Image: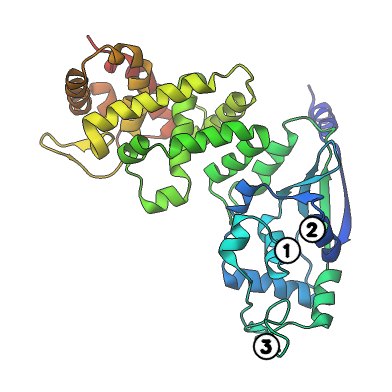
Amino acid sequence: MALEDEVKAARTEIVSDGYDMSIGEVMNLYRDKELKIDPAFQRLFRWDQTRKTRFIESLLLGIPIPPIFVFQDADGIWELIDGLQRLSTVFQFTRLLTGERAEELGPLILEGTQFLPSLAGKLWEPSSPDSDDGIGSAQQLQIKRARVRVEILKMESDAKAKYELFQRLNTGGAGLTEQEVRNCVAVMVNKTFFDALVTMSNNPNFVRTSAQTESAVESQASVELALRFLAFRNVPYLKGLDVHEYLDKALLEIASNENFDAASEAAVFRKTFEYLDHALGDSAFKRWDGTNFKGKFLMSVFEVIAFGVSKNIEALDQMQAVDRDAFLIDKAKKLWDNEVFKANSGGGTRGTTRLVNLLPMAEDFLKPE
């Protein structure tokens, strides 16, 4: 197919519209629940006070702002795809923001800026009848009359269009990690699956064995690990495919699959990390130096041990707990003598090379004799 034909075919998959609106009109849509922000998205609203203040300043000064993107559902309701930080800032400042994040954040108190130093300490409305800490009705009108372009992806578009649009708009942006983008896509595709993924990532045995740092938890690394586990078991890895592209693909396939046995997979997940926690605790995915398990969590060890245990869960079920513990501890140590593992687990090994070589050996390596 020629490029021109490919472009025409792709354009027919996306039905869109768009027009300029005032911020006041957008506020009304949100107030009337005709514009919605999923609670899972709200948790990603994390601009600091300075960035929030600068955005409000932009509205007051009439500085053009980037468009927002929404998806229009069958009922005509708009679902926010891109523009979370900007709109949430407006809604927090004007005290319209709802949900858990609104309670956590409280009122937005502005900082002073180079151009508008008098913004320091200002609120949307005065804190009391005698206070002068509100921005005043003239400035409220200025914000409400500020214009923003709204790009609308209509429901007639291809089913995956809004997910792909969300990824393109957000991947690599200043806000979200790649897994946070996947989390948002999971919410759009299958909220039940997303909830199950989060439940897995919070499993106590999983939390202990993966021994994630606070920063890793903040970046949703634990949710990514749970997704990796499901992906390895359900979506074959294709040689050469970028790891994050593989996870994107696996997420869409699993979340969109009506025949995916979520209950069975969750049971295997629970048993896998229950057995590993009982045997190894927070040493499950660390380096064995010949004397002790030490250092930090290693992805290469996780890919072999967690996947390998899951593929042999029925055989491990038949073992006595003391024998199973001894077996898993022995395998965790012997992994570091395995030639395939040693050749594909070093610091310079690319994720693509690691996966294509380690995943095939994991099941046999963890198979009880």
- Cα separation, mark 3 vs mark 2, equals 29 Å
User: Tag 3: residue type?
Assistant: Ser
Q: Residues within 10 Å of mark 2 (few under 14, many from 20)?
A: some
User: Tag 1: residue type?
Assistant: Leu
- The quarter of the image holding the C terminus is top left
Q: Is 17 positioned to the left or the right of 196 in the image?
A: right
Residue linked to disc 3: 118
- Cα separation, mark 1 vs mark 3, equals 24 Å
Nearer to us: label 1 or label 3 = 1
Residue 204 at x, y percent in the picture: 36, 38
Q: Earlier in the sequence, mark 1 or mark 3?
A: 1
Residue extending farthest front: 129
Q: Which mark is residue 96?
A: 1
Q: Kindly indicate whether the residue at mark 2 contacts the one at mark 3 (C-beta within 8 angstroms).
A: no
User: Tag 2: residue type?
Assistant: Arg
Nearer to us: label 3 or label 2 = 2
Q: Is 109 positioned to the left or the right of 200 in the image?
A: right
**Element marked by disc 1:** loop
